Amino acid sequence: MKKYLIKLKYIVLGTFVSLTACVSDDLANVGDLEDITGPTPFYNLTDVTSSEFDCNDVELWAKYDFNFQGGSNLAVNGTSYQWSVSPSENVALINKDLPILEKSIEAELAAIVALEKEIAKRKFKLPCETNQAKKDVLEAQIVDFEAQLANAQDALSDETIQNVADLESQIANLPAATLQDRELIFSFPGPGEYTVGLTVTDNLGKSDYTEKLVTVNQAIPTIPIPEIGEPGFEDNSLFDGTGDGRDSWRSPSSSRWGSVFQINTDSNGRGEGSDLPEGVQAAKFPSDGTRTGYQEIEVTPGATYVLTYFTAFEETSFGDVTVSIVSTNADSLEDAKLEANIIASRTDTNVGRVDNVFKKHAITFEAGENEAVIILITNSGVESRVDAFDITVKQ
């Protein structure tokens, strides 16, 4: 019986070898199937346009740069890339690594770059400033920052100088960007519509094409952030280093708008144990509601803003604080209550609040056709405190 089993094993093995010998890649429809999967191209783009305007919103320069990054469904298959752009006149190509190396230089020179930005901010404001006292302060600050800048440049270490030199050498040796780069920056000559296409080819010669219509918008001035005087009610926080924390909040007439609020100083200072959101002072409104805060700020017509601030209350009885954005058409506290003059308003109460614990609030408002608005603060019921105003442009 064992002998017959051995013979059967060899018969099966011989049959398998015979069958496999009949399979040949040279025979039609036999063997590996043809790879018919071709590349599916796609690309992402990021608008990195930059520009500069003077304080009169006159364009000084604009760079209409877009970062393009190509890809396909083939992770590794010998793919190559070919970009096209139409119209192509005066479109420049930039190596993707250039901005990275430039940022690395800025990081090495962080202290110097920070001082240069402070100088630039003041030089930007100076030509359009009409208040001579503010102009004098800006000029003095520029002189001071320029002296600090010279000292910072003299204090650069040999290591930093060498690091910057190495980065500048890398920039000088960067290969020119080409339309065959997978990632590159297109620098467009100006606003308009451009058709940007990408062809991806694999190592078998298969290729496919995709394109998008890229709209390059005209550069526009950045909407300036309004300046709130003494936003945290701190002493000596005016532009010239003076002020009692509330000088910016005095109304044109106490008889029409009420007397300015009082100042509360945290006995714990700003260290451990302070309950103030910032600084050591806050605006204090007595419970009788006779005190107000009034400040006009400049806004840009058509812009939308977010105003934030903090409130705190005593809990002896019901009380509230109202912060309103009021049209400059209002000429009194009574006018400010008219619906036609209220641009936005928010009232917060002490219901559910913890005694003298600050809570943050926000008001979103549209400037509309206004070039200036009034921030108005009123209260009633209990002694209340307000602190740390801030304003941003809503994008």
Image (cartoon, rainbow, N blue to C red):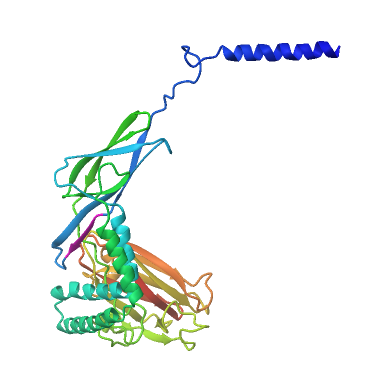
Q: Which of the 4 quarters of the picture holds residue 143?
A: bottom left
Q: Position of residue 159 (x, y in %)?
A: 35, 74
Q: Which of the 4 quarters of the picture holds residue 287?
A: bottom left
Q: Is residue 339 visible?
A: no
Q: Is residue 377 above or below residue 57?
A: below
Q: Position of residue 157 (x, y in %)?
A: 34, 78
Q: Nearer the viewer, residue 161 or 250?
A: 161
Prevailing secondary structure of the magenta residues? strand
Q: Is residue 322 above or below residue 200?
A: below
At horizontal 49% and vertical 17% (from top left) the residue drawn is 25
At horizontal 27% and vertical 64% (from top left) the residue drawn is 168
Q: Quadrant of the N terminus?
A: top right
At horizontal 85% and vertical 14% (from top left) the residue drawn is 2
Residue 194 in magenta stretch: no
Number of marks present in the image shown: 0
Q: Quadrant of the C terminus?
A: bottom left
Q: Which of the 4 quarters of the picture holds residue 249?
A: bottom left
Q: Residue furthest right?
A: 1
Q: Nearer the viewer, residue 288 or 232?
A: 232
Q: Is residue 173 visible?
A: yes
Q: Nearer the viewer, residue 325 or 13?
A: 13
Residue numbers of the magenta segment = 49-53
Residue 50 in magenta stretch: yes
Q: Position of residue 77 (x, y in %)?
A: 41, 35
Relative to 285, is 85 on the left or the right? left
Q: Is residue 63 above or below residue 79?
A: below
Q: Position of residue 269 (x, y in %)?
A: 46, 87
